[in-house]
Structure formats: structure tokens, C-alpha cells
Image (tube, grey):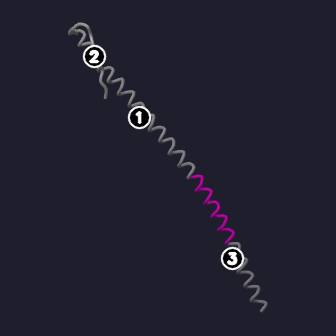
């Protein structure tokens, strides 16, 4: 929203007033277009930032999942060795 004040040393003619009305509409459209463009640009930047954050989170989750899988494998191996050791020990007793 804005205001433009025009002054003159003489009264505006009908032609001057018509011109001002036409120009003011064009200026209003241009300003609205610029504001809309700015808003779209801000939303695009926000969207790109969110996409980057999501990618980082996805990578962190992928790494954490890989670590959990490795720990699971180690636990399974440990459990297997423990069972084998227990069975072997019980056979010796």
C-alpha cells in the first residue's frame, strides 16, 4: 500500500487526470507483481532450505541405521559364540 502525492502550479486538466489514473493502475500492477515475485523468491529459498535440512536428516538416519545393523550383527555373533561356548562347556562337565 502506498501513496503518491502530485503537485502542480495549475489545475490538472481532464487529460492529466486520465493519464494519472492510467499510470497509477500500471504502477499498482507493477508493485503488486514485484511483491508477488519477492514472496515467491522467499518461499523458494525456504523450500530449498527445508529440502537441504531433510537431506541432512536422511543422511544422519541412514548412518544411524547402518550402525544399528552393525551392532545387531555383532550381537548375533556374540550370542552364537556364547551358545556354542555354553554347549561345549556343558559337554565337558
Among the 4 quarters of the image, the one containing residue 7: top left
What residue span does the magenta drawing correspond to?
58-75
Residue 57 horizontal/vertical position (percent): 56, 52
19 or 56, which is in the foreground? 19
Residue 42 within the segment the image draws in magenta:
no
User: Seen in the image, is 85 located left or right of residue 5?
Assistant: right
Location of residue 19 with respect to 42 vertically, above or below? above
Q: Earlier in the sequence, mark 3 or mark 2?
A: 2
Label 2 neighbourhood size at 10 Å, few (<14), some (14-19), many (20+)?
few
The residues tagged by marks 1 and 3 sit, at their Cα atoms, a distance apart of 59 Å
Label 3, on which residue? 79
Residue at the location (73% across, 81% down)? Answer: 84
Name of the residue lying farthest toward the bottom: 93
Label 2, on which residue? 22
| Label 2 element class | helix
Residue 77 horizontal/vertical position (percent): 70, 72
Work out which quarter of the rendered image holds the N terminus and state it: top left
Task: Specify the principal SS of the magenta part.
Answer: helix
| Label 1 element class | helix
| Label 3 element class | helix
Label 1, on which residue? 39
Residue 47 horizontal/vertical position (percent): 47, 42
Amino acid at each position: 500500500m502506498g501513496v503518491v502525492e502530485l503537485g502542480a502550479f495549475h489545475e490538472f486538466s481532464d487529460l492529466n487526470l486520465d493519464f494519472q489514473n492510467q499510470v497509477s493502475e500500471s504502477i499498482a500492477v507493477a508493485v503488486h507483481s514485484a511483491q508477488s515475485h519477492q514472496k515467491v523468491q522467499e518461499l523458494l529459498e525456504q523450500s530449498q532450505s527445508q529440502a537441504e535440512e531433510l537431506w541432512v536428516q536422511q543422511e544422519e538416519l541412514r548412518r544411524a541405521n547402518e550402525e544399528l545393523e552393525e551392532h545387531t550383527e555383532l550381537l548375533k555373533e556374540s550370542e552364537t559364540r556364547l551358545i556354542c561356548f555354553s554347549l561345549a562347556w556343558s559337554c565337558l562337565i
